[in-house]
Amino acid sequence: MTAGRLVSKRTLVRGALVAAIGAIVLAAFLAQRAGPSSAGAADHLDAPGLTPPPGGDGIGTDLTDIYAFQSPADASKTVLIMNVNGLTTGDLAKPPGPDRGFGTKVPLVEGNPNVSYNFRVDSNGDAVPDVNIQVRFNKPDANGAQHMRVNILGAGGSDEDGIEFAGESTGFDQAPVVNSGPLGIKAFAGRRDDPFFFNLIGFLNVLDIGGKSFVGCGAANSHPETDTFKGQNVSSIVLELPSRLLEGGGDSNIGVWATTNVGDSQIDRMGRPAINTVFIPNNPFPPDRVVDGKPSKKTTFNHGQPSTDVANWTGEDVDTLRTTFSLNDNGGALGGTDNPADDPGKINALAAVLLPDILTVDVSNPAGFLNGRKPADDVIDAELGLITEGFVTTDCVGANDASFPSTFPYLASPH
């Protein structure tokens, strides 16, 4: 594939984020009064297979969000963020849950029980990782601090031994510990405010217009109090490193996804928000609902690789898109005016670029979403109007409940 074609394909893939992220909101149109236990947001609680056996330890292996963007402090560097230990069902009506650290070992898993956190970077557009950044932790001390080790393999297109350095995570209620590695690399790990902002209750009750639904709620920042993630925490891994370590042949366009692993077994993965949550059965859309008898394939998706996504999951994307595209049809339940005659062509074109599930970013470009993703990007409002054909344009939660710092580690202090 030529460089020009590669850039063009990646541009199309960025556009596919429109459906992947915005569709999570549309799920509620059919879920109606579904309870929080059936919901996911970004990648929070997206799969049922996170507890042993045979999966992870249930703590530290559930990915919530990932971010990739040009460093605001140094344009020659890229920031990568991976969050785990996010919202639980019990958190919906409570203060933040207990402080939780990073996984170390999972005794109930046979073989190698070590937990690892991995950034996978594709630098040539083939949906196969060219750079692997692995972070591991040991047991926490009394205040939750853990020794951590960062290992970068394949950096800068090299197959040599890679870059490895050690550091410390930030203990609970402690000031952020910034670890320095070679080549000006910075690393942070510890509890942070959950940067995802979204009216999940309004999403779950979106048909209750005039009640709990966020439809017609007002302007983009009218109701910050409805942010379900207000006051919630996550465990974050933040890296800032020279972009050249992630690029292949000087191409600044890369793809990023994250995985959590126990030994050689992959537990969870995430690239774009909402792919597994919305498009992979079972989900709220016929024919993929529980009531339709469709078994869950979410754990199967999480165990898979982006390189096989197109072959394995395009049909599931098409199933869901047929429903989401129909929501604004003339004569439909929402009072839409759209002529659905051109929907099949749009659906097939969009399904062709939705997968693989990789977050694409031009690291030479400081722009945010759809170019990668920054913590402050309102990914929901950015896509609502497009995926609903103008029916809904905001959930009225336009910003995080805590301001994001302009300095490393770029995430707000935990609650």
Image (cartoon, rainbow, N blue to C red):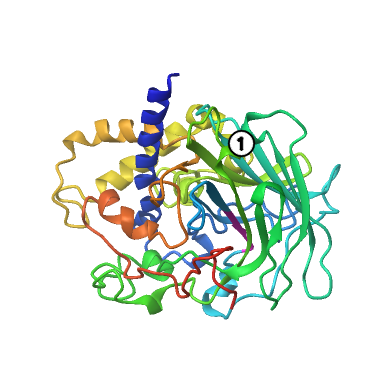
According to the image, label 1 marks what residue?
304
Quadrant containing the C terminus is bottom right
Q: Is 283 one of the magenta-colored residues?
A: no
For the question of whether residue 28 can be seen, the reply is no
Type of residue at label 1? Gly
The spot of residue 24 in percent (x, y) is 40, 54
Q: Pick the residue in front: 79 or 379.
A: 79
In the depicted structure, whether residue 117 falls above or below residue 396: above
Q: Considering depth in this image, is 380 or 134 the residue closer to the camera?
A: 134
Task: Tell me if residue 112 can be seen.
Answer: yes
Q: Position of residue 128 (x, y in %)?
A: 59, 30
Residue 92's x, y, as percent? 52, 74
**Magenta portion: prevailing SS class:** strand
Q: Name the foreground residue: 148 vs 295.
A: 148
Task: State how many labels appear.
Answer: 1
**Quarter of the figure with residue 170:** bottom right
Residue at image point 61% right, 40% down = 120
Quadrant location, the N terminus: top left
Q: Quadrant of residue 394?
A: bottom left
Q: Relative to 82, does residue 259 appear above or below in the rendering? A: above
Q: Residue at x 44, y 64 (%)?
A: 34
Q: On screen, 360 above or below 402?
A: above
Name the residue rendered at 57%, 38% in the picture.
244
Q: Is residue 365 left or right of residue 174?
A: left
Q: Residues within 10 Å of mark 1 (few under 14, many from 20)?
A: some
Q: Is residue 214 left or right of residue 68?
A: left
In the picture shown, does residue 320 fall above or below 102?
Answer: above
Percent position of residue 397, x then y: 36, 70
Region in magenta: 81-85
Q: Secondary structure at mark 1?
A: loop
